[in-house]
Amino acid sequence: MYVKKTTIINKSGLHARPASDFVALAKQFKSKIKIKNLHSLEDGAQNGKSIISVLSLAMGQGTPVEISAVGEDEQPAVDALITLIDSGFNE
């Protein structure tokens, strides 16, 4: 398992378009990918390849997140998703 943390920086947070971009990128990898809202009191990480799961985390600007992956391409998957988040989804 490979895990990294970052913070949502774009003004509108992880709303529909950025969530769609996140899921589209996640689906390019074979690894099982999870995303977790670190401000949430609930313990569960959600499926990073499911738009509904990602949107259900309700992550706005400033939300700390954890991305994890398990599989043959886990490190490049997490690194690519962290880079996408850190870019502010080009907003």
Image (spheres, rainbow, N blue to C red):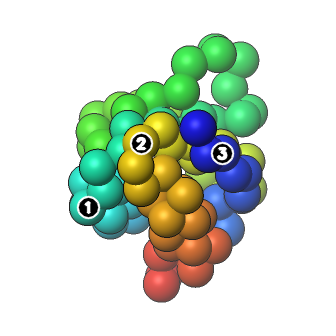
**What residue is at 64 percent from the left and 15 percent from the top?**
42
Distance (Cα) linking label 1 and label 3: 18 Å
| Mark 3 or 2, nearer chain start | 3
In this figure, which residue is indicated by the disc labeled 1?
Answer: 28
Q: Residue at x 67, y 68 (%)?
A: 9
Q: Which mark is residue 71?
A: 2
Give the residue at x 72% y 35%. Answer: 38
Mark carried by residue 53 = none
Figure quadrant of the N terminus: top right
Question: Nearer the viewer's eye, disc 3 or disc 2?
Answer: 2
Residue type marked 1? Gln
Marks 3 and 2 sit apart, C-alpha to C-alpha, by 12 Å
Q: Decide: marks 3, 2 in contact (CB < 8 A)?
A: no
Crowding near the residue tagged with mark 1, few <14, some 14–19, many ≥20 C-alpha atoms within 10 Å: few
At label 2, counting other C-alpha atoms closer than 10 Å, the crowd grade (few under 14, some 14-19, many 20 or more) is some
Which is more N-terminal, label 1 or label 2?
1
User: Disc 1 vs disc 3: Cβ atoms closer than 8 Å?
Assistant: no
Which residue, given by chain and number where applicable, does mark 3 sit on? Answer: 3
Q: In which image quadrant can residue 85 be found?
A: bottom right
Q: CA distance from mark 2 to mark 1?
A: 13 Å
x and y, in percent, of residue 6 in the image: 72, 57
Q: Position of residue 71 (x, y in %)?
A: 42, 42
Residue 45 in sight from this viewpoint: yes
The amino acid sitting under disc 3 is Val
Q: Quadrant of residue 25?
A: bottom left
Residue 39: x %, y % from top left: 74, 33
Which residue is most to the bottom? 90
Q: Kindly identify the amino acid type of the residue bearing the numbered disc 2.
A: Gly
Left or right: 21 as drawn, with respect to 33: left
Secondary structure of the residue carrying numbered label 2: loop
